[in-house]
Image: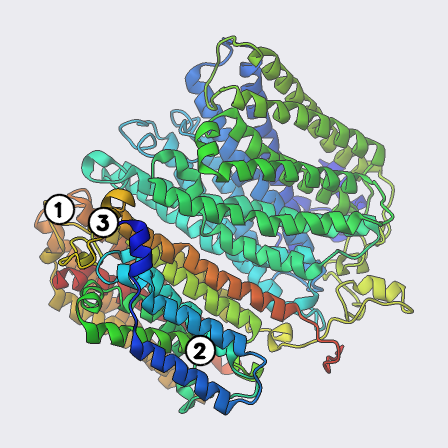
């Protein structure tokens, strides 16, 4: 394998002393640049896997009444294809690009938490392996990427495929949340001195805003998956109507995540377009403020409108109407973006290099995908086209037409920076044309197939007029795209080996990542150019006509909060989403009384006492922080120990309550009260335990004298978490123990 | 009574409200010389009077939960915001002690008003008892003012900075959405008084149930959805205005390129 290490080191991806142990140098890395590349390579590997699945699907559908693939296998293929492409391709690839580029664009040395970064990355291969392990464990999931209940429940999917699917998504979701917390804190705390928040390059801004969407949306999915797993493994009925559960609730939870998810992968793609189009139009972006502001609006709107995915479920006309109106609104901020990009190109001196070609195509195709999206927002049209190939065409225009094209554009654009080599332009152009022709051949026709009535997710179809040739054309298009994929990989390999050497700024771009060598040194920058506007390198190259200065007007412009505290606070935001769903589920299922155990079987007085202990621990940890500030380390340790003791008493109290319930015959599956009670209080207890472990670590550090060496934010950061756990208990206590007494 | 008759006749002349509005207008003219922003005040007063005297009020008075919710949103979010916007920029709204001016108090006022008045017992009491109803109306206006003061106080120095304001507004939006979601999807009735209007004073019940096809369940759904979706758009518009404020680059401000 010496060839690999020599190629890597010639491409500048390995230093001389690392050549001997190049595998470790990459596998154990905490450098954001290498982690970024690892993310992208992982995404590429799964792109091949998901691509092969897509080709198999297309082969089966190439001709009517085909028998190449059995119906069951077909269901497995489209489930795995969807899950893989979203969670193991789009997200890792975009996170990888952001991982590499964001710290460079903001003039930082690395991400805020390099180890968290490595951890988040390694969860991706773990999740991927878990998902694919299901093949060995009795068959993959066959329930579609949104795993609607009750199909995904044990009575209908008894094999463990769905369990692996859910576990893998929890793992991947956790990794995404971790890396998003990291992006938020990095942008808030690691910016170069003059890189104010309002001077951020659009890509970094969008990753920043998008990360909030991730930490708000992914926990909702995690909560749903946890409930699904509890249903499947502990024989409960969250989503099973026969036991009093609600299958519609799963849909609400899934789409409350699923709709933002579309934007979670689309917004970074918007960011890529916003970087590349101006550079190759030789003009600054038209309306920076509008592009940046509309991103924020898209983020917020996307959290509110999920129910438009459920028009066909029969939610009633009232709900439909509200969600039609609100979903249509999203067209405004997205339209603003499309206009901005187009206006950037108008009157510019356009250079159609491969990255630019990909972005222009992405813009055009996204426009089409957006328009068909609007037709899905109208409930009456949606009733006709949902679950037909029209829908398949629509979301592939967004996922492939926009996102994959943007990713390919980004790789072509930033490859010189990452490797110090240019990608071959001729091969790049071949890749582009094969891709664009193949993509449109496959998916434009599917609009018509859908309108002609071809349903999605069927393994074969009768020989109706027009269906055969359109499907055959789509299959041919898919193979065009596969060829483009192969060319793309070939281009990367050949360019790494003998590509033309890239200068520091081969595209004459303007953001900070181009102000360092290609590839950048380990510490990223030796010297940063002055930053006064949004295009520092333009100002540097054109001192006589610089961009207008973007001033410092707000404290937040330059503020840099302490990173550990910022990290914990961001984490708390995501945890709020998780507990919010569990509490809402509790309320929903306990709104009307049911047979079996109920809240009246709980002992409020005993729990009240243990709750007081928990609340008192918030006070003691606050005293501990005060002692730390005063420099009284013995008192600090003592208060800390008291906190741990009080937290421990609470956990013991919870244990006693569980024990009492178990003894009186109440179990997880007794009824939905028991299920929701154990789920909610159990997860809270788990968080208390994690808090106790953190506190024990801090106490250990304190006893070892770590805090005497200087001010450490560790205690305060853990303190935030501890207070949060207590606040959650206030809500749990109210909802579970006190509310039923009022009825 | 059919719909047209209802829309024509269901206006109630609330003289106390009219007197208050005239007094407010007079006070404004007496206190502030400039009438540059008086449009906001007039708009606010108009919305206020419409809310309290139009058929919306007649419906909210025992017939429709959703009409009550519309009233609630207008009184809490629209009217106070318009009043605040009408004040000249020189007016200070600083409160003492300073702790009372903390953003969290404002946030809790705005969000708390929503949750508090939808506790079933209070929601019913506000319909059945005139004094409670008056307290509700006045408290919504005051709490709404406390909420918006953080974002659109006349003096720029008394407002939150745009990023904090975005967080402030967004969390408020989310918290109200949660209540909206609960009301929309809840299998239980929030405001039981609306399910069986005790006295059909206007003889409207048949029109509502038969012509408008509003069953009590659907009525509650609309109420919840009003809070879930359009109300969030109020916050969202404010967020958008904050983004504009954040990115605005005043021509001659003493910005420095540090």
Q: Which residue is mark 3?
A: B216
Quarter of the image that includes the C terminus of chain A: bottom left
Cα distance in 3D space between marks 2 and 3: 38 Å
Q: Element type at marker 1? A: loop
Q: Residue A105: give x, y in percent of width and height.
A: 71, 59
Residue closest to the eye, B206 or A533: B206
Pick the front one: B233 or B201 = B201
Whether labels 2 and 1 belong to a single chain: the reply is no
* Residue depicted at x 21% and y 68%: B122
Residues packed near mark 2 inside 10 Å, few (<14), some (14 to 19) or many (20 plus): many
The residue that label 1 is drawn on is: A594
Element marked by disc 2: helix
Q: Is the residue under label 3 in contact with that under label 2 (CB below 8 Å)?
A: no
Q: How many numbered badges does the structure rendering display?
A: 3
Residue at position x 38%, y 67% from top? B50
The relative height of residue A108 versus residue A9 in the rendered view (above or below) is below
Give x and y (percent) for residue A388.
Answer: 48, 25
Left or right: A207 in relation to A388: right
Percent coordinates x, y for residue A211 in the rendering: 55, 56
Q: Which residue is mark 2?
A: B103
Q: Residue furthest right?
A: A544
Q: Nearer the viewer, mark 2 or mark 1?
A: 2
Subunit under mark 2: B
Q: Residues within 10 Å of mark 3 (few under 14, many from 20)?
A: many
A644 lies above or below A251: below
């Amino acid at each position: 394998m010496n060839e690999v290490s020599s190629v890597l080191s010639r491409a500048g991806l390995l230093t001389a002393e690392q050549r001997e142990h190049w595998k470790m140098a990459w596998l154990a890395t905490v450098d954001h640049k290498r982690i970024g590349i690892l993310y992208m390579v992982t995404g590429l590997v799964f792109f091949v896997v998901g691509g092969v699945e897509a080709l198999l699907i297309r082969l089966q559908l190439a001709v009517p009444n085909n028998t190449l693939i059995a119906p069951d296998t077909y269901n497995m293929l489209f489930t795995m294809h969807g899950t893989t492409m979203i969670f193991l391709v789009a997200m890792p690839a975009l996170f990888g690009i952001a991982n590499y580029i964001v710290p460079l664009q903001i003039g930082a040395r690395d991400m805020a938490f390099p180890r968290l970064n490595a951890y988040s990355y390694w969860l991706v291969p773990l999740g991927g392996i878990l998902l694919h392990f299901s093949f060995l464990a009795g068959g993959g999931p066959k329930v579609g990427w949104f795993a609607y209940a009750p199909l995904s429940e044990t009575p209908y999917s008894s094999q463990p495929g769905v369990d692996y699917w859910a576990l893998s998504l929890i793992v991947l979701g956790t990794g995404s949340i971790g890396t998003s917390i990291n992006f938020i804190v990095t942008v808030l705390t690691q910016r170069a001195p003059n890189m104010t928040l309002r001077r951020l390059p659009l890509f970094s801004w969008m990753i920043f805003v998008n990360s909030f969407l991730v930490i708000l949306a992914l926990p909702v999915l995690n909560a749903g998956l946890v409930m699904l797993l509890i249903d499947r493994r502990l024989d409960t009925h969250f989503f099973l109507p026969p036991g009093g559960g609600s299958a519609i609730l799963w849909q609400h939870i899934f789409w409350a995540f699923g709709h933002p998810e579309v934007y979670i992968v689309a917004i970074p793609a918007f960011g890529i377009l916003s970087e590349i189009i101006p550079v190759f139009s030789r003009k600054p972006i038209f309306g920076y403020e509008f592009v940046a502001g509309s991103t924020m609006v898209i983020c917020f709107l996307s959290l509110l409108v999920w129910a438009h995915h459920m028009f066909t479920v029969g939610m009633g006309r009232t709900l439909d109407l509200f969600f039609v109106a609100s979903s249509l609104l999203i067209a405004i901020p997205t339209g603003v973006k499309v206009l901005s990009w187009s206006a950037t190109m108008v009157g510019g001196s356009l250079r159609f290099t491969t990255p630019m070609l990909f972005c222009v195509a992405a813009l055009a195709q996204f426009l089409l995908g957006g328009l068909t999206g609007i037709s899905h927002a109208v409930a009456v049209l949606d009733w006709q086209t949902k679950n037909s190939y029209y829908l398949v065409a629509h979301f592939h225009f967004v996922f492939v037409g926009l996102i994959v094209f943007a990713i390919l554009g980004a790789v072509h654009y930033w490859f010189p920076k990452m490797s110090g080599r240019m990608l071959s332009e001729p091969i790049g152009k071949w890749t582009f044309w094969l891709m664009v022709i193949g993509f449109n051949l496959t998916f434009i026709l599917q609009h018509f197939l859908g309108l002609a009535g071809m349903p999605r997710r069927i393994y074969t179809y009768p020989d109706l007029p027009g269906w055969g040739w359109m499907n055959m054309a789509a299959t041919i298009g898919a193979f065009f795209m596969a060829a483009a994929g192969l060319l793309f990989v070939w281009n990367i390999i050949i360019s790494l080996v003998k590509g033309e050497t890239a200068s520091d700024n081969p595209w004459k771009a303007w953001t900070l990542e181009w102000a360092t060598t290609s590839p950048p040194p380990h510490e990223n920058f030796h010297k940063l150019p002055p930053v006064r506007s949004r295009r520092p390198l333009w100002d540097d190259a054109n001192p006589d006509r610089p961009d207008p200065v973007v001033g410092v007007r707000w404290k937040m412009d330059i503020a840099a909060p302490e990173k550990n505290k910022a990290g914990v606070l961001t984490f708390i935001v995501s945890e709020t989403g998780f507990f919010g769903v569990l509490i809402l589920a509790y309320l929903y299922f306990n709104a009307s009384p049911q047979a079996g155990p109920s809240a009246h079987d709980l002992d409020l007085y005993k729990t009240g006492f243990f709750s007081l202990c928990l609340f008192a621990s918030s006070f003691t940890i606050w005293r501990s922080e005060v002692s730390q500030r005063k420099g009284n380390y013995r008192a600090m340790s003592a208060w800390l120990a008291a906190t741990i003791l009080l937290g421990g008493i609470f956990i013991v109290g919870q244990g006693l309550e569980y024990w009492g319930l178990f003894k009186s015959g109440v179990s997880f599956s007794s009824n939905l009260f028991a299920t929701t009670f154990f789920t909610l209080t159990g997860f809270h207890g788990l968080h208390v335990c994690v808090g106790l472990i953190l506190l024990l670590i801090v106490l250990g550090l304190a006893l070892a004298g770590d805090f005497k060496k200087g001010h450490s934010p560790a205690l305060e950061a853990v303190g935030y978490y501890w207070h949060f756990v207590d606040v959650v208990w206030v809500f749990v206590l109210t909802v579970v123990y006190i509310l039923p007494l009022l009825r | 009574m059919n719909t047209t008759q209802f829309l024509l006749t269901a206006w109630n002349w609330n003289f106390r409200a009219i007197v208050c509005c005239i007094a407010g207008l007079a006070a404004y003219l007496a206190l502030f010389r400039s009438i540059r922003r008086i449009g906001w005040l007039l708009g606010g007063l108009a919305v206020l009077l419409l809310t309290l005297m139009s058929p919306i009020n007649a419906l909210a008075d025992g017939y429709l939960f959703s009409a009550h919710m519309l009233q609630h949103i207008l009184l809490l979010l629209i009217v106070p915001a318009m009043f605040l916007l009408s004040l000249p920029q020189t007016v200070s709204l600083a409160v003492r002690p300073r702790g009372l001016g903390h953003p969290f108090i404002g946030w809790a006022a705005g969000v708390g008003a929503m949750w508090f008045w939808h506790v079933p017992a209070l929601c019913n009491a506000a319909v059945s008892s005139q004094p409670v109803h008056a307290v509700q109306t006045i408290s919504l206006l005051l709490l709404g003012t406390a909420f918006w003061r953080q974002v659109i106080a006349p003096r720029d120095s008394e407002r939150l900075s745009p990023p904090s304001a975005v967080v402030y507004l967004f969390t408020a939006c989310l918290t109200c959405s949660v209540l909206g979601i609960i009301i929309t999807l809840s299998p239980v009735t929030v405001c039981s008084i609306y399910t069986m209007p005790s006295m059909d004073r206007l003889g409207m019940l048949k029109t509502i149930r038969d012509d408008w096809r509003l069953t009590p369940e659907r009525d509650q759904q609309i109420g919840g959805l009003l809070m879930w979706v359009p109300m969030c758009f109020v916050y969202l518009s404010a967020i958008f205005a904050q983004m504009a404020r954040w990115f605005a680059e005043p021509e001659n401000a003493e910005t420095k390129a540090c």
